[in-house]
Image (cartoon, rainbow, N blue to C red):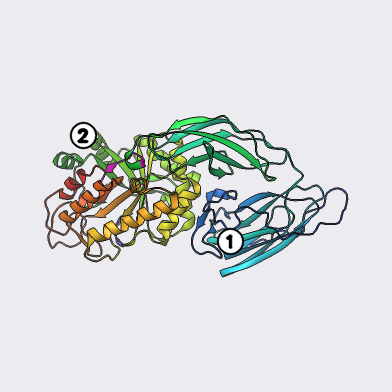
Amino acid sequence: MRNSLRRSRRRIFALLGSAALALAGAIALPGTAQAANVLSNPGFESGSLSPWSCSGNLGSVVSSPVHGGSKALAGAASSSDNAQCTQTVAVQPNSTYSLSGWVRGSYVYLGVTGGASTWTTSASQYSQLTVSFTTGASQTSAQIYVHGWYAQGTYYADDISLDGPGGSSDTQAPTAPTNLTSTGKTSSSVSLSWSAATDNVGVAAYDVYRGSTLATSVSGTSATVSGLSASTAYTFTVKARDAAGNVSAASNSVSVTTSAGTGGGTGFKQAAPYLYEGWGDPPNPATVMNATGIKNFTMAFVLDSGGCTPAWDGSRALTGGADQTAINQIRAAGGDVTPSFGGWQGSKLGANCSSASALAGAIQKVIDAYGLKSVDMDIENTDEFENEAVQAKILTALKTVKANNAGLKTIVTFGTSTTGPTYYGNRLIEQAQSIGADIDVFTIMPFDFGGGSDMYGNTVAAAEGLKTKLKSTFGWDDATAYAHIGISGMNGLSDQQENTTPAIWTQIRDWGNSHHIARLAFWAANRDRGCAGGGVVSNCSGISQSDWQFTSITAGFTG
């Protein structure tokens, strides 16, 4: 999958102020720092960011590289966002504090908002930053931050410590959040939003409860609670918490029954081979549908035609051309489509749109043009898959469009090793969990991985590796994890001469059905024609087969 067949697929640095926080009111001698870390989740060992909050949703918790324990913070600084992560804590007035942290990366900063800071130009391994500051005479809270620098790539931070006297004279709790409501649900998750609480100093976090159990803590006024069971009623409330640890009364409660679904998944099942109108002698989709019984196609590829503007292949008009004609034919025959954004080559929206909101706007144009029920983000190559800031941008955009389009299903498609997700695949999954992207299907492409001749065994091993990663990241059981998995193969010969025969594809389909996965696709219907000895070409599979044989097999996928 490394050629056209795979898919037409400042340096400005500023020193932050180093002066200590200004003293306000009467001058008094500072207190002495105590050997107690007043930060919460200082090493990110909880597996979540809370109560840290990161700009642009660019922060995530990762398992490598770490300084201590098993987790660390990764901040995917971009050209427009330094991925600043902050935590507000209660402090004593007129007291001295020592702030330290272990960081790794280019131009990483550690400090307190409005006061002292320190930084390092480059750290290929973890190095410690330390700075001290003194609070003002009436100061009861401080905001600690760590961030990278623009366009310098991902930084890492771990074991952050703020040593000094904790507590505060603040004893006033925030008001209760109001207007709690459900904004969406699947068979395994519920999305919630509420109106902000107020506090005499400031709200530091919101704690979301499922019954009497704390489900998650967030800094904003929305959250998605995952790991739920299908067709089950849950009651949720939210409480506000300030930096001094004062907790509000509970909000109004809201009861939600999750959707029905196989194995605790999303209830989304799709058999949808790729169809590409810009390459490989594209077949008439109605002909293929009539011959095979297939009902859905994944339409390739939506790219950037310039200025974050979506177009088919980056050149064909979004509507009115061959792609819309094909979509109309599919729908007239009782089927539907899932457009795929990205691929291996071309000018991609994920890489080129300036922000997550801009990318979400581009995706929304395609949703509106075709009244879509699902979208696929095919995240490949170094510009998207191996670019952590772009990964974050794509996931945040998908979270946005899902929130704005009731019932929309979101799919991410990416490469794999023979044993499961690679480093960047693992990071993609971890970041999806960290920002609450609520992705419906994680689809792997088990080919062009140098997997040798056992395409069935290697495909199953890769899918089982994905299942294990989803379980450990989201806390799902086996059934729920399988129900969020997709497989997208390559029929016949792959670019690396791996051979998936019709018999092997049938085995893969049957394994997918027996494990109740969510999605089965292959690249591509254009190649679903026999040409034994024809090699790896655009309009046939390179092996002996009957026309549309792989599509017929795929049509038998039910999940």
Amino acid type assigned to the residue bearing label 1 in the image: Asp
Amino acid type assigned to the residue bearing label 2 in the image: Ala
**Is 25 displayed left or right of 175 in the figure?**
right
Residue 211: give its label. Answer: none
Q: Secondary structure at mark 1?
A: strand
Front one among 365 and 493: 493
Of the 4 image quadrants, the one containing the C terminus is: top left
Q: Find disc 1 in the rendering and name its residue.
A: 158
Tell me residue 385's x, y (percent). Answer: 41, 57
Magenta: main secondary structure equals loop
Q: Residue placed at 75% from the left, 42% from the top?
A: 170
Of the 4 image quadrants, the one containing the N terminus is: bottom left
Front one among 318 and 203: 203
Q: Is residue 294 above or below residue 499?
A: above
**Residue range of the region highlighted in magenta in the rendering:** 264-272
Tell me residue 541's x, y (percent). Answer: 18, 56
Residues at circles 1 and 2 in contact by the CB criterion of under 8 Å? no
Q: Secondary structure at mark 2?
A: loop
- Near mark 2 (Cα within 10 A), the count class, few <14, some 14-19 or many ≥20, is some
The answer, for residue 393, to whether it is visible in the render is no
Q: Residue placed at 86% from the left, 48% from the top?
A: 25
Tell me residue 479's x, y (percent). Answer: 34, 46
Front one among 537 and 195: 195
Q: Find disc 2 in the rendering and name its residue.
A: 333
Front one among 291 and 142: 142
Tell me residue 284's x, y (percent). Answer: 19, 42
